[in-house]
Structures are given as C-alpha cells and as structure tokens.
Amino acid sequence: MATPVMDKVEAESAASPYITVTFRVRRFNPEVSAEAVWEDFQLEIDPKERVLDGLHKIKWDIDGTLTFRRSCAHGICGSDAMRINGKNRLACKTLIKDINPEKPITVEPIKGLTVLKDLVVDMEPFFQAYRDVMPFLITKDTNEPTRERLQTAEDRERFDDTTKCILCAACTSSCPVFWNDGQYFGPAAIVNAHRFIFDSRDEAGEQRLEILNDKDGVWRCRTTFNCTDACPRGIEVTKAIAEVKKALITRRF
C-alpha cells in the first residue's frame, strides 16, 4: 500500500511563514493635492519582520513614490519615527506580529509638525528648540583642557537616563501641548537640557534654566505622560521634566 504523500504545493504553503497584511498609509503630495488621502497596500510578509520592512516592500515593489525617512534601521538614528496604529513608534523597532496584523496597519506622519510629503515632516522647529537649550558642555574655562574633566559614577548616574535621547521627536510629537502650540519647547528639548543641567562638569545650568523658565518653556508641561509612553528608548521623560521644574524653584541641581 502506497504511503500518502503531501502535494508539493501544499507542503510549500504549509511551510511558508508569510501572511497577507494590509498597510493603510496616509499619503500627501502637495504637488498633486492639498488634501491627504489614505491608500491601502496588500503585502505578503513574514510577521516577524518590521513595519519598516513592509514600507520598503511597498516602495521597492509596488509604489516607488512612497516617501519616508530612515537611516540606520536599528533604532539608533531615530529618523523613522511615525504613527503606527495611532501610536508614535520607530518603524524599525515595531514588529508586524506585535500590532495585530489581522487588521489594517495604519501608518501616518507624527503630529504637530508640518507634513512635507507622505510620512516626512519638517523637523526644523523641533531641532531649533533643541539648539535653543544649548545641548553641549559649557565651562568658564575657554582654554583647551589639558586633562580629562573627571566625575564620579554617582555624578554620571544623575543624568544617565537623559543621555539616551536619539532625537526621534516621538515624545515631542505625542505631546498635546505641542500639537496645539508649536512654540512650546517640547519634551525632547527639555530632556536634552536636563542632560547638561545636571552634569557636574557643566557650568551653564542657570542659563538653561532661564531659557526653560520662558512662557514656552517647562511650565507648559501638563504631565500627561504621553512623552514617556512614546519614547522608544525608555527614557523617563516626565520625570526629567519634573526635575527641571524642581531645579527652577529651588535653584539646586
């Protein structure tokens, strides 16, 4: 008696890791229309792949006009921050299987910044706020240092969390205050100010505090925790903002 043999096509189908996923992408091209539209793309993709891989498949195989930012693709550069299923995430760190691929996966640009095309926004206001808080070491000694500026492990730990920022804008563009008023410095700028305000080697803490004491500064924060939830690096953003507020009141840092 012959042993039943699985059909070759059935065997290949059973072994295939691919599933069919719908990517619903918010498209905007100012050269075509002043209105944004949603466009669906059907993909065969391994659920263990990332949303960024899906966007690559769309751009390379279906529609080369799809526009988005990405660089390192490993969660370090922060350039591919976007809203995925209504939450700010890095496309390169978001696995298909983790966001319910049985339903359409919505992808749209981060909020609060002007959309230039598709998923690309104008980051200049975000980076201007970053530059305004002087995100670099400042000392009174203007001469070239002749030795290391030493600090203890405890001093380093004081601002360790806020050194993790990759300037992806996920926190700032999740903030309802920033959505309503783009003049607000935003969480990312405050986080990067915190990094130097509490650095024992820096001597410009008072200057940064005065900058953040402005009407568009740290007092605009309403402590909604959106920024902390959105941070792909796990920074306790709301805690850092609270510490800057406390430093402004006590002038101790």
Image: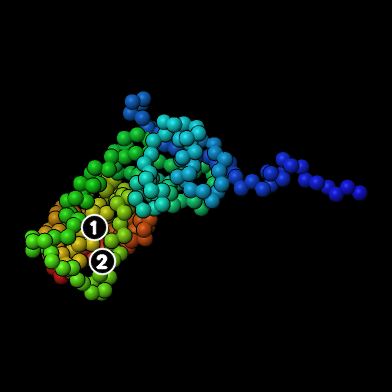
Q: Is residue 9 left or right of residue 214?
A: right
Q: Circle 1 — which element? A: helix
Q: Is residue 55 left or right of residue 148?
A: right
Q: Residue at x 43, y 42 (%)?
A: 107
Residue farthest along the front direction in this orientation: 146
Please give the residue where the numbered disc 2 appears in the rendered image.
Answer: 159
Q: Residue 108 location, x and y as percent?
A: 40, 41
Could you tell which of marks 1 and 2 lies nearer the N-terminus?
2
* Amino acid type of the residue that numbered disc 2 sits on in the rendered structure: Phe
Q: Residue 240 location, x and y as percent?
A: 26, 63
Q: Does residue 205 sit above or below 100 in this rendering?
A: below
The 10 Å Cα crowd at callout 2, few under 14, some 14 to 19, many 20 or more, is many
Q: Does residue 45 sit above or below 236 in this rendering?
A: above
Q: Residue at x 36, y 53 (%)?
A: 76
Please give the residue where the numbered disc 1 appears in the rendered image.
Answer: 192
Check if mark 1's residue and mark 2's residue have beta carbons within 8 Å: no
